[in-house]
Amino acid sequence: MIYREFQDLKLSALGMGAMRLPVVDGNDSVIDEAAVNEMVAYAMEHGVNYYDTAWGYHNGNSELVMGRALGRYPRESFYLATKFPGYDLSNMDKVEEIFEKQLEKCGVEYFDFYLFHNVCEMNIDAYLDPKYGIFEYLLGLQYTYLNNKKLSKTYLHSALKNCRNTPYEYEIRKLL
């Protein structure tokens, strides 16, 4: 497997996305879990360590199935990405509730990557609107994660760039 350095992480150049997993009888909501387990096992055996899922994939079942499949492996052996479903504007005031539910569905204590899903002219203002607190909430989670993990100066400097002029800037500076 070819790996790429990303900040202090060694990511496989090939990742496994979970948007179109095998399904049973053509029903997108019913994922063929045995097939997914085989796919993840094959990927892990061949050095894939980056896995991507999302709230809406397979009508909400992708995170559950990928969480169970990846749960067979030590947490430090893979990187997991998921996304906040801002493509549905009714989710904008539910960032904490959705994030916590995603952790539960994936069976993990943290995500290595958390993305804003489908950012476009329809939702960019809402993603950044302080009344929803999405950006601020996620920055707070990033700070909590940074504070509980020994991270390199490179990663902390990157995090600091994202936290300028927020309540977390001072706290991250203390970690440097």
Image: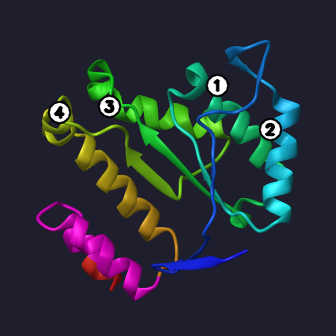
Circle 2 or circle 3, nearest the eye: 2
Q: Position of residue 47 (x, y in %)?
A: 77, 68
Helix, strand, or loop for circle 2?
helix
Measure how far apart labels 4 and 1 are at the Cα level.
26 Å
Circle 1 or circle 2, nearest the eye: 2
As rendered, which of 148 and 57 lies closer to the eye? Answer: 57
Q: Tell me if label 3 and label 4 are in contact, CB under 8 Å.
A: yes
What residue would you read off at disc 4? 126
As rendered, which of 62 and 140 lies closer to the eye? Answer: 62
Measure how far apart labels 1 and 3 are at the Cα level.
18 Å
What residue would you read off at disc 1? 61
Q: Position of residue 145 (x, y in %)?
A: 46, 62
Indicate the amino acid at tag 2.
Val
Indicate the amino acid at tag 4.
Ala
What residue would you read off at disc 3? 86
What residue would you read off at disc 2? 36
Indicate the quadrant containing the C terminus: top left, top right, bottom left or bottom right.
bottom left
Q: Residue at x 44, y 30 (%)?
A: 98
- Nearer-N-terminus badge (4/1): 1
Measure how far apart labels 2 and 4 are at the Cα level.
35 Å
Helix, strand, or loop for circle 3?
loop
Q: Residue at x 42, y 29 (%)?
A: 97
Q: Position of residue 67 (x, y in %)?
A: 70, 41
Helix, strand, or loop for circle 4?
helix
Indicate the quadrant containing the N terminus: top left, top right, bottom left or bottom right.
bottom right
Instruction: Please state the extent of the stretch shown in magenta in the rendering.
Output: 152-172
Q: Residues within 10 Å of mark 2 (few under 14, many from 20)?
A: many
Measure how far apart labels 3 and 4 are at the Cα level.
8 Å
- Nearer-N-terminus badge (2/3): 2
Q: Main secondary structure of the magenta part?
A: helix
Helix, strand, or loop for circle 1?
loop
